[in-house]
Image (cartoon, rainbow, N blue to C red):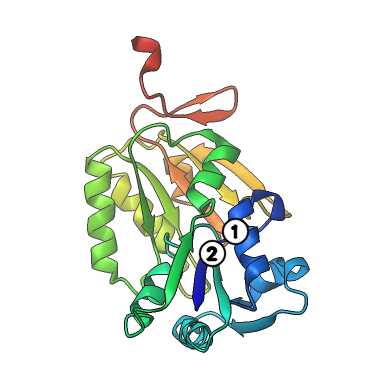
């Protein structure tokens, strides 16, 4: 009985680790969000698939655990890294009654690092990753995390900045950050990092507060040291001063 929880990276095959591809190849069953299975379609021929839409995570992971307990080798796939807003935690929770089940979590390139690479080197020092989705986390707690990380001068990487129902969360987040950070702070946005149609933009925090993005976008907000060098965002770690 073997269950892999696989981070497939941004979605382009070239950015998937060889270990992730090997786990999928070894699996009889692959479970994932419909879009992710479509991205993996060249690897899934003759494999059983467990697919659900958004908000079907528990159903999908429970079915994957049961398939593994029945004796099949199963991969549960997540975009980016399976342990960063992915399915690793949920799978381990659902598999608790089955201590005999062998589970291996395979890491992948997450949106923070994929987007940072597009923009330059904005994550060169301490940073925090915060999701603006309040589906599973109450907004007051998200606000508190934004405020405290801003006070600590941490670089911020924002996941899930908005959706059809949450059109103002990014502007609200920027308002909180602007209480502690200059409006000219360099920022960057990357849409579809590592996927076809990738696009990016560098702008100030003040401009970001008035910018509309979507769920396919990752937002990076610099700290007091972040600068723009030849069009690239860079947060120095201090090596030049040694």
Toward the viewer: 72 or 18?
72
Q: Position of residue 202 (x, y in %)?
A: 55, 38
Q: Residue at x 54, y 85 (%)?
A: 71
- Residue 225 occupies quadrant: top left
Visible in this render: residue 211?
A: no
Q: Residue at x 59, y 27 (%)?
A: 231
Which is nearer the N-term, disc 1 or disc 2? 2
Q: Position of residue 15 (x, y in %)?
A: 65, 49
Q: Is residue 155 above or below residue 35?
A: above
Within-10-Å neighbours for mark 1: few <14, some 14–19, many 20+:
many
Residue 6 bears which disc, if any?
Answer: 2
Q: Residue at x 59, y 59 (%)?
A: 20
Q: Is residue 171 above or below residue 135?
A: above
Regarding mark 1 in the picture, which secondary structure is present there? helix
* Image-based side of 110 in relation to 39, left or right: left
Within-10-Å neighbours for mark 2: few <14, some 14–19, many 20+:
many
Toward the viewer: 98 or 122?
98
* Image-based side of 19 in relation to 210, left or right: right
Q: Residue at x 40, y 34 (%)?
A: 185
Toward the viewer: 106 or 205?
106
Residue 212 bears which disc, if any?
Answer: none
Q: Position of residue 230 (x, y in %)?
A: 59, 22
- Residue 22 occupies quadrant: bottom right
Q: Position of residue 79 (x, y in %)?
A: 56, 63
Tally of marks: 2
Q: Is residue 28 above or below residue 25?
A: below
In the picture, the quarter occupied by the C terminus is top left
Regarding mark 2 in the picture, which secondary structure is present there? strand
Visible in this render: residue 198?
A: yes
Q: Are marks 1 and 2 in contact (CB under 8 Å)?
A: yes
Disc 1 marks which residue?
20
State how far apart marks 1 and 2 are (Cα): 6 Å
């Amino acid at each position: 009985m073997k269950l892999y929880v696989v981070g497939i990276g941004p979605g382009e095959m070239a950015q998937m680790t060889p270990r992730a591809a090997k786990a999928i190849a070894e699996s009889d069953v692959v479970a994932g969000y419909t879009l992710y299975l479509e991205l993996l379609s060249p690897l899934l021929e003759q494999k059983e698939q467990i697919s659900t839409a958004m908000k079907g995570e528990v159903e999908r992971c429970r079915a994957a655990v049961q398939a593994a307990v029945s004796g099949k080798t199963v991969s549960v796939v997540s975009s980016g890294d399976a342990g960063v807003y992915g399915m690793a935690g949920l799978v381990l929770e659902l598999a608790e009654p089955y201590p005999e089940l062998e589970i291996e979590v395979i890491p992948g390139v997450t949106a923070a690092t994929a987007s940072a690479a597009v923009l330059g080197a904005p994550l060169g020092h301490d940073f925090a990753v915060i999701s603006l989705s309040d589906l599973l986390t109450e907004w007051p707690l998200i606000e508190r995390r934004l405020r405290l990380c801003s006070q600590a001068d941490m670089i911020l990487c924002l996941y899930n900045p908005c959706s059809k129902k949450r059109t103002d969360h990014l502007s609200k987040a920027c308002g909180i950050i602007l209480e502690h950070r200059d409006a000219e702070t360099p920022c960057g946005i990357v849409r579809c990092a590592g996927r076809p149609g990738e696009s990016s933009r560098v702008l100030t925090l003040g401009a970001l507060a008035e910018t509309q993005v979507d769920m396919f976008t990752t937002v990076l907000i610099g700290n007091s040291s972040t600068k723009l060098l030849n069009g690239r965002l860079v947060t120095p770690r201090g090596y030049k001063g040694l």
